[in-house]
Image (tube, helix red, strand yellow):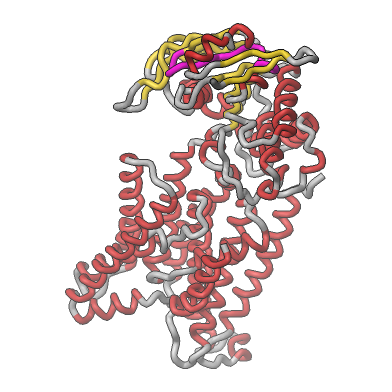
């Protein structure tokens, strides 16, 4: 008899949870500027305030962003049965970025507020999904066609972002440039709360569909014969992925490669059962981006490099290796 | 008693020529029915309609008096298990995991229950896959993969099983084993509809033949009647001949 999947999944998820908690507990203590741990322990200023108001929310943001991007990547790879499907390669990240940049560039007042940027990013990522859905109604497409379409859409979105950037005034131009670098900054706990809610919703849906995603590995014809409404699952999955990516991108700016690296590494280590892969991607992706953020703020301290740079420098070679090892 | 009725069944793709025209037939379990016809005759489309994947342009396809395309999808899959012609070759699942996919119509919970596990054990025993249960599906041969897919269909616990060319690309040993397995399932009480190009094996194993000719049902009869050489020559546009071996086995040959 095979090992009961409940036991295997339970023990792996528990181990991953403990590892992720350990990473999340240690990394707020690391950083470019030194911290007096004795003062922090006693709750004295300014170390306590730095820890609570800067380091902890930053770690939580990195964790939530990494978790959401990883789950979105695993979701797209499952739905399209294509290893190279990621939020970036499908154009979802660029579209969310275009929406956010549009809100920043065209907004009124000194600086565009978070709710507006968030809504605009969701509109951007949702527009890509609606566009692809409209194409899908006209003609059936392959995963390869969808990836090429995503690359084309990314190019168009990038061009429009550059156009908006060049037309924006100096203040907004700076805000756009800063946002585009893809960074993890300390944000208010209320923002983290909204983000956590959106990500929990998307992750919950993904876990609920994990058995269906497993069946989809055998192709749409097989899944249809097991009672799966493939069309509905596909578009719901796209929409959930867009919601996850759009929500994260609104806060952090575009961060690439997380949705590629984490699901693939974990798939190679733990297999392709999505009942295990989705929760472990959530934990592993969160821990991965927390570590990347710690590296970004420590390696050239006191200068901080955007976390998108770190993930790209790790993800670029990984992407090439993935292409050549298939 | 499970009763599948095709009543004036027609199908055409939007803006296209009719693929199926005026199909009338009845199937009751247990039976092993071969669906035979040239390429493009509408065999796979007919299976798709019976599986509820497509909606008829006209006529009805009913199961126990209910139009199939109106039955809720999971409920339909508890009655009809469809094994399509192609699944991806590289599926990163074990044989057991693939077989358990057949339990999805019985519940969408995150984990399979004891009943699902028992159904899997029965399917493995019935399809003689005990030695393969822990192996990776992607590492199996074509014949072994077909057996695993058939096991998943058995695990689905549906009284009707539809198979689209299950013995295509199999060597004679695996092909013979597949047909013997289908016969065993028929004897266990299933209604099996199998699309095939192997007329001799169909004649040997099937109870009835549905012979399709350009979307029409040219014959719905026992094999020796359906495979009347003049009819086969008209349908396939090549002469057919029945032969009998010294041991008394009959077989079909074709060609000029």
Q: Nearer the viewer, residue A86 or B192?
A: B192
Q: Is residue A275 above or below residue B160?
A: below
Magenta-colored span: B203-216
Picture residue at 43% right of the left edge, 60% below the top: A87
Q: Is residue B188 magenta?
A: no
Q: Nearer the viewer, residue A189 or B144?
A: B144
Picture residue at 58% right of the left edge, 20% below the top: B254
Q: Quadrant of the N terminus of chain B?
A: top right
What is the quadrant of residue A223 in the picture? Answer: top right
Q: Position of residue A166 (x, y in %)?
A: 20, 76
Q: Position of residue A296 (x, y in %)?
A: 49, 83
What is the quadrant of residue A306 in the picture? Answer: bottom left
Q: Position of residue B6 (x, y in %)?
A: 50, 12
Report the number of discs: 0
Query: From where the camera sits, is residue A312 visible?
Result: yes
Q: Is residue A83 above or below residue B51?
A: below
Q: Is residue B141 above or below residue B69?
A: below
Q: Is residue B214 left or right of residue A223?
A: left
Q: Is residue B215 magenta?
A: yes
């Amino acid at each position: 008899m095979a090992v009961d999947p409940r036991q295997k999944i339970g023990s792996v998820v528990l181990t991953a949870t403990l590892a992720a908690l350990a990473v999340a507990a240690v990394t707020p203590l690391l950083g470019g500027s030194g911290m007096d741990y004795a003062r922090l322990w006693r709750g004295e200023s300014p170390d306590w305030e730095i820890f609570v108001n800067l380091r902890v929310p930053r770690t939580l943001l990195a964790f939530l962003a990494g978790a959401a991007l990883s789950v979105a990547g695993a979701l797209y790879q499952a739905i399209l049965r294509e290893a190279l499907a990621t939020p970036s390669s499908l154009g979802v990240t660029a579209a969310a970025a275009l929406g956010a940049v549009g809100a920043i560039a065209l907004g009124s007042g000194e600086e565009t507020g978070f709710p507006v940027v968030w809504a605009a990013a969701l509109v951007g990522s949702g527009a890509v999904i609606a566009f692809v859905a409209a194409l899908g109604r006209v003609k059936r497409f392959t995963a390869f066609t969808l990836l090429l379409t995503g690359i084309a859409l990314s190019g168009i979105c990038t061009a429009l972002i550059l156009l908006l950037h060049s037309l924006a005034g100096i203040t907004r131009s700076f805000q756009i440039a800063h946002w585009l670098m893809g960074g993890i900054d300390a944000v208010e706990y209320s923002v983290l709360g909204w983000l956590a809610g959106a990500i929990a919703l998307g992750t919950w849906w993904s876990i609920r569909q994990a058995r269906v995603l497993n069946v989809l590995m055998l192709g749409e014809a097989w899944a249809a014969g097991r009672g799966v409404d493939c069309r509905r699952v596909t578009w719901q999955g796209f929409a959930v992925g867009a919601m996850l990516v759009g929500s994260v991108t609104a806060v952090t700016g575009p961060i690439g490669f997380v949705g590629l690296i984490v699901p693939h590494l974990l798939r190679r280590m733990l297999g392709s059962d999505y009942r295990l892969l989705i929760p472990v991607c959530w934990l592993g992706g969160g821990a991965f981006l927390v570590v990347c953020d710690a590296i970004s703020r420590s390696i050239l301290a006191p200068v901080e490099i955007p976390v998108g740079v770190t993930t790209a420098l790790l993800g670029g070679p990984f992407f090439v290796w993935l292409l050549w090892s298939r | 008693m499970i009763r599948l009725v095709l009543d004036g069944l027609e199908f055409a793709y939007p803006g296209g020529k009719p693929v199926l025209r005026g199909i009338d037939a009845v199937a009751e379990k247990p039976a092993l029915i071969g669906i035979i016809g040239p390429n493009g005759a509408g065999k796979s489309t007919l299976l798709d309609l019976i599986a509820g994947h497509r909606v008829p342009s006209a006529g009805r396809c009913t199961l126990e008096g209910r139009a199939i395309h109106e039955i809720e999808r999971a409920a339909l899959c508890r009655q009809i298990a469809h094994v399509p012609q192609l699944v991806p070759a590289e599926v990163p699942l074990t044989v057991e995991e693939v077989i358990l996919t057949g339990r999805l119509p019985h519940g969408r919970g995150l984990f399979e229950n004891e009943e699902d596990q028992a159904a899997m054990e029965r399917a493995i025993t019935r399809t003689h896959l005990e030695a393969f249960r822990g192996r990776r599906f992607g590492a199996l041969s074509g014949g072994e993969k077909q057996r695993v897919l058939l096991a998943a269909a058995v695990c689905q616990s549906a009284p009707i099983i539809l198979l689209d060319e299950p013995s295509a690309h199999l060597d004679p040993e695996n092909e013979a084993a597949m047909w013997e397995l289908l016969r065993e399932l028929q004897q266990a009480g299933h209604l099996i509809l199998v699309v095939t190009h192997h007329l001799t094996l169909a004649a040997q194993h099937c109870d009835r033949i549905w012979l399709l000719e350009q979307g029409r049902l040219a014959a719905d009869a026992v094999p020796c009647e359906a495979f009347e050489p003049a009819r086969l020559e008209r349908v396939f546009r090549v002469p057919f001949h029945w032969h009998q071996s010294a041991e008394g086995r009959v077989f079909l040959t074709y060609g000029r």
